[in-house]
Amino acid sequence: MKKSSETAAADRRLSTVARHLITTTTNNEEEENGSFMISSSPTAAAGQSVFSNIVGAPEDPILGVTVAYNKDPSPVKLNLGVGAYRTEEGKPLVLNVVRKAENLLVNDRTRVKEYLPIVGLADFNKLSAKLILGEDSHAIRGNLVTTVQCLSGTGSLRVGAEFLARHYYQHTIYIPNPTWGNHTKIFNLAGLTVKTYRYYDPATRGLNFQGLQEDLGSAPSGAIVLLHACAHNPTGVDPTLEQWEQIRRLIRSKSLLPFFDSAYQGFASGSLDKDAQSVRMFVGDGGECFIAQSYAKNLGLYGERVGALSIVCRAADVASRVESQLKLVIRPMYSNPPIHGASIVATILKDRNLYHEWTLELKAMADRIITMRKQLFDALSARGTPGDWSHILKQIGMFTFTGLNTKQVAFMTKEYHIYMTSDGRISMAGLSSRTVPHLADAMHAAVTTVV
């Protein structure tokens, strides 16, 4: 049917606006790292991909380490970049308690593969809240907390960030400097403005507590503050309990909103309760907070992507309404979470014997990492490596922030086939008694050869 002159004119105006938007987007909205680019041409030439103008993105700074490691044919290569536990033989570990739980699930003929609710597995959510908050938590007793199952720690952070961007009056979040490399992207893409507060002191290789207090003290009222619950990534530097108490008082006095990232509960000290102390201090004062949990490290469920987001509110009816809005965040994002990994966790947490066995395996992993710290420190001391390396013993958790610079890291990769992130962070869980001497040799050579 022939178009009217008015309709044809409207179509031409719409086409002009569309071309302008495409050109404007191309010029103004290209990401700094070149990970995507919108083509300025609305159609591709014959035989040419419509994505021909896309710029190749750089490798992820953490996951890219493994990519480079896999390409290296050297028999002595060592991957200390990946944040995953390895046995003394350098092999991935599946916990015995996880295998037992899986066997129970496989043999349960009543289990089906139906969709979970949007918020996930009910038992998993209830037990996850108890694990991080404590069974006697007033927040649990008073129904002040809502917990939803998410896609590991990353997904829990993202769901929480999306919720805050939609429903919280402050869109600024302060994250420690340095922090896990994915934090900035998660919060930025959710619609929050990211600022940093001082955390690590390169001079002491410890906590810059004064700088932390000054920066949070000058933050605007209501700002969100990201806190690592324990085993700070990448530095391995945690506040003392006394410092945590001062941080709590400062945050509450400024009406800041704490958002905990708990990726290593039990994996840092070997005690689930000890590693949850910082979170419980904040929940115990009756204030509100967000907590993102991950079971990747402490149960070795890396690929199962098992996590939870808990939001502690001041009133039960508020917590209920918050949950209703979390559903609206999750539904268009991934609809509902996977069932298998959460079922493993719930099976272990609700069985007294399995839970006890898990605590023993968890402590064994934490203790082996502590042993690796001692062996590396002793090896550097034996070689007379210049510098004070006591921070290796003082830091906690999976990672050590060595203090090595980018050039020294590159030297170790080239000459000794040792792979780590460029900031000098190494995964202590990737070390073994067999590989400690090789790492110590490389660190000694880097420190004495490269400035």
Image (tube, rainbow, N blue to C red):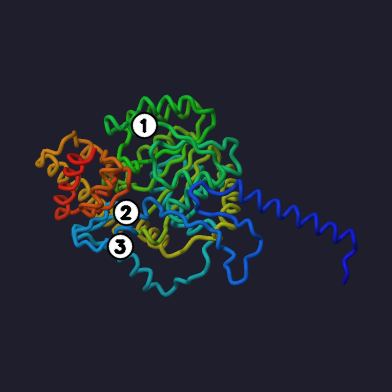
* Amino acid type, mark 3: Lys
Residue at 29%, 50% (x, y): give it.
420
Kind of residue sitting beneath label 2: Val
Q: Residues within 10 Å of mark 1 (few under 14, many from 20)?
A: some
The amino acid type found where label 1 is placed reads Trp
- Apparent side of residue 147 relative to residue 178 in the rendered image (left or right): right
Could you tell which of marks 1 and 3 lies nearer the N-terminus? 3
Residue 349 in percent (x, y) is at: 36, 56
Q: Which mark is residue 82?
A: 2
Crowding near the residue tagged with mark 2, few <14, some 14–19, many ≥20 C-alpha atoms within 10 Å: some
Quadrant where the N terminus is found in the figure: bottom right
- The span from disc 2 to disc 3 (Cα, nearest Å) is 15 Å
Residue 208 drawn above or below residue 316: above
Describe the element under mark 1 as helix, strand or loop: helix
**Which quarter shows the C terminus?**
top left
Q: Which residue is mark 3?
A: 71
Q: Is residue 240 above or below residue 413?
A: above
The residue that label 1 is drawn on is 244
**Closer to the camera, 385 or 232?**
385
